[in-house]
Image (spheres, coloured by chain):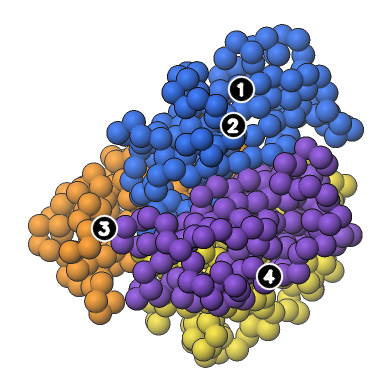
Chain colours: A blue, B yellow, C orange, D purple
Amino acid sequence: MSRISYVNQMEEWEQEFSFSIPINVRFSETDMFGHLNNTVMFVYFEEARIEYFKHMEFMQEWVKMSVEMMPVVADLQCDYIRQVYFGESLRLYVKSARVGTSSVDLHYMAKNEQGKICFVGRGTMVNVSKKTGKSMSWPEEWKERLESK
Amino acid sequence: MSRISYVNQMEEWEQEFSFSIPINVRFSETDMFGHLNNTVMFVYFEEARIEYFKHMEFMQEWVKMSVEMMPVVADLQCDYIRQVYFGESLRLYVKSARVGTSSVDLHYMAKNEQGKICFVGRGTMVNVSKKTGKSMSWPEEWKERLESK
Amino acid sequence: MSRISYVNQMEEWEQEFSFSIPINVRFSETDMFGHLNNTVMFVYFEEARIEYFKHMEFMQEWVKMSVEMMPVVADLQCDYIRQVYFGESLRLYVKSARVGTSSVDLHYMAKNEQGKICFVGRGTMVNVSKKTGKSMSWPEEWKERLESK
Amino acid sequence: MSRISYVNQMEEWEQEFSFSIPINVRFSETDMFGHLNNTVMFVYFEEARIEYFKHMEFMQEWVKMSVEMMPVVADLQCDYIRQVYFGESLRLYVKSARVGTSSVDLHYMAKNEQGKICFVGRGTMVNVSKKTGKSMSWPEEWKERLESK
């Protein structure tokens, strides 16, 4: 799997994940080819990302009207490795792969019940000002929390 | 089709529609049974309803921050008549079937390229106050516009 | 709530449910009005219905290529009672309200963490032949299982 | 925009597109942050890709039961440049950026009504055997068609 540019060494990369959420593949998420439609992985990434941010107590802050920052997705990508079918129970992992001044690069990995990797992904989130739309530095304490996970 | 409680006499009901929008069935909207997933009709109803409200120049008002009313869906229903497949081009019709003091009962009908009805539906929209969440009477002029279409 | 035609007496109706699944409201399921988009309830109904059918060991049969029956949704409806927001954990209940020769009328109820009903619904499922598309009688043993839940 | 690895020189890259489809942003595709949810771009990419394949008369072949090939998405990515809002009319462009023996690298670009680029993307499609799931060489004539667009 050397074709995946953001994965240097697969076993090592795989072992750096600790946070994960369970995902049940919905019937409405399949398509006429009989498997999980390729657009749904990004819905799962969003769910995992938000649970990860909740776990770090960021999400609760961002949705407050009084808080002047919000997270914005700068880019997203997904590499499809194994077909996923209706009724499968996946485990979706997230980690902070690189923490910048006002951004964080998140990596994603989905495994099926046999522990096989079905798809992986990554994407940069930027912390922006709700007023100006410009990027804002992470509060120092948030940066530390991101770096520790 | 006497089983559909909100359709008294089908031909007459069918002829009362004038507003419609085109819909292309997306691949991601099918499911592993090979046809349009049954949850997607409500996405189409919403799209048609909003275009209908735009056509009457309501939607532009509702999304304004300064306007104190917003439309709320009270209920929705759909009766499935014919399977719909990927790549079909549908025409989705909407009409105001009954206009109340602060609500409107909208009816929906989807036809395929052969002019056959694939599914029909209905639902009540209520005009509510953004502040209190309580229903608000339609402005008189809006009520007239709804009754004329 | 006497406006909901399929609910005779609310407390009694509510107590007839026993099967339920947990649902977490996803961020991507909200809309710009800040709450759960009204089309998503039908996705939840489908997920609950399928888990209910799995629980009765029907779903495993239906998806088999060798089995000549499949379930088809004849109609669906939803009554919206309380707004639902991102991050809420719902419990979605399903029951067989009436079992016909080749159909079943399913009822749905969603409660939030405070035990308040957020939305309810119903819909008829018909058992049809994969070959002819015509309705097929339930196997006797399936009918019994449906009637007992 | 040098951060986008698959765009060497933006003006040149932009001018290589000729095929496009119109997209209307649906209300149900927004989220509580008020803009188009970041997972929906991939639904648009799929719609554009399929219309592009239809235009080249591939799609009609792939969905046939008798045809032993099907297209599989190997990877997908999106770079978000400008927020997109409800009611916007986008134009979504697709092109074949590189044609391999059994794969094609598609590029995507979405512009708003002011001609501003809102998001761009890319992804590799692989032609695989329905039986074995292994990649299959493009029919020579298909390869030529892909290279000419």
Badge 1 sits on which subunit? A
Considering depth in this image, is D110 or A21 the residue closer to the camera?
Answer: D110
Considering depth in this image, is C134 or B12 the residue closer to the camera?
Answer: C134
Image location (x, y in percent) of residue C120: 45, 49
Q: Amino acid at mark 1?
A: Ala
Q: CA distance from mark 3 to mark 2?
A: 37 Å
SS assignment at label 1: strand
Which residue is located at x 51 percent, y 60 percent? Answer: D101
SS assignment at label 3: loop
Whether the residues at callouts 2 and 4 have beta carbons within 8 Å, the answer is no
Q: Amino acid at mark 4?
A: Lys
Q: CA distance from mark 2 to mark 1?
A: 10 Å
Mark whose residue sits in front, 3 or 2: 2
Q: CA distance from mark 1 to mark 3?
A: 40 Å
Mark whose residue sits in front, 4 or 3: 4
Which residue is located at x 68 percent, y 84 percent? Answer: B18
Q: CA distance from mark 4 to mark 3?
A: 40 Å
Which disc number belongs to residue A6? 2
Whether the residues at callouts 2 and 1 have beta carbons within 8 Å, the answer is yes
Q: Which residue is mark 4?
A: D149
Q: Earlier in the sequence, mark 2 or mark 1?
A: 2
Badge 3 sits on which subunit? C
